[in-house]
Every structure is written in structure tokens, then in C-alpha cells.
Amino acid sequence: MSTHLRDLEVHLPDRPGALADLGQALGAAGVSLEGGSVFTVDGRAVAHYLVHDGARALRSVSTAGLGPAVVRDVVLARLDQEVPGQLGTLARRLGDAGVNVLVQYSDHVGNLVLLVADDDAAAAREVVAAWGRRLTPRDGTATARPAST
């Protein structure tokens, strides 16, 4: 199993049971969700979930007849939850660097998950590296106290 976290994007029908179909398909394939969400806007439901094994997740969605679906790399960042305005500050730095954030959510251990265009990934990673926060590892233990801004 790959330990590289990826974003699984799935377009679902706007109907009762669609999320259950997705969850059951992923569960049956042994795909664990590490964070994410689903939103419906104007009759279009789009799910974004953080997964370890993107290829397996994509196969399970396809086999279940769900989708369209795609798997993409993500950029992970950490905010100091005790300091108001952290999201705005980091987002401003990303915007000033020309990075357009397409999707943002949190994983189960409190890391910020950012999905950006492939062309913006390097710049996003540079901004996040300069941000100076440490990610919380998958076991939930902190690696360092976040730096102040």
C-alpha cells in the first residue's frame, strides 16, 4: 500500500444513497478515508477524500459505476488552531504566489489539505515550506509546535 496521500475526486449523482454507494465501494476495496467532504451545488455532488492508495480507490469507484473520478496529488499544511486568521494568512501567501486553491479541507489529524492545479503545485509547496508549520503525523502525535506568524 502506498503511503503517499492523494485526493480522490468523485462526481456523484444528486440522489439519496449516492454517498452510501461511494462509501461502500471504497470500504469493500479496503480503502480508508483520511479526511474529506462532499458538497452539492446546483444539482452536482462532488466528493473529495484523502486516500493512501489512489489507484485502488479509483478502481473501486469505476467498478461501482460511480464517477467520473480522478486522483490527484495534494499539498499538506498545518495551521496553528489557537491563532485566528491563519487560513487567511496562508491563503494570501498562496494567492500572492499565483497559486489558485481549487479545494481545501482537513484530514483527520488536523492538517490542511490543499488541491491546486498541477502547474501551481511547486509554487504551493514552496509557500507551505516557508510557512514553517510541521505536519501532524498519521498517528496523531505532534512533531513540533507551530511557528508564529
Image (cartoon, rainbow, N blue to C red):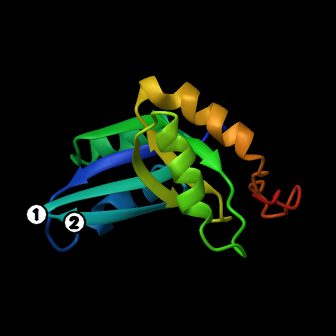
| Type of amino acid at the residue the image marks with label 1 | Gly
* Disc 1 to disc 2: CB gap under 8 Å: yes
Which residue is located at x 45 percent, y 33 percent? 98
**In screen coordinates, is 83 left or right of 30?**
right
The circle on residue 40 is: 2
Height in image: 31 above or below 116?
Answer: below
Screen quadrant of the C terminus: bottom right
Height in image: 106 above or below 97?
Answer: below
| Residue 14 percent across, percent down from the top left | 14, 65
| Residue 80 percent across, percent down from the top left | 72, 66
| Type of amino acid at the residue the image marks with label 2 | Thr
Can residue 31 be seen at all in this image of the molecule?
A: no
Residue 119 sits in quarter:
top left
Say which residue label 1 marks. 43
- Element carrying mark 2: strand
For this orientation, the residue located farthest to the left is 43
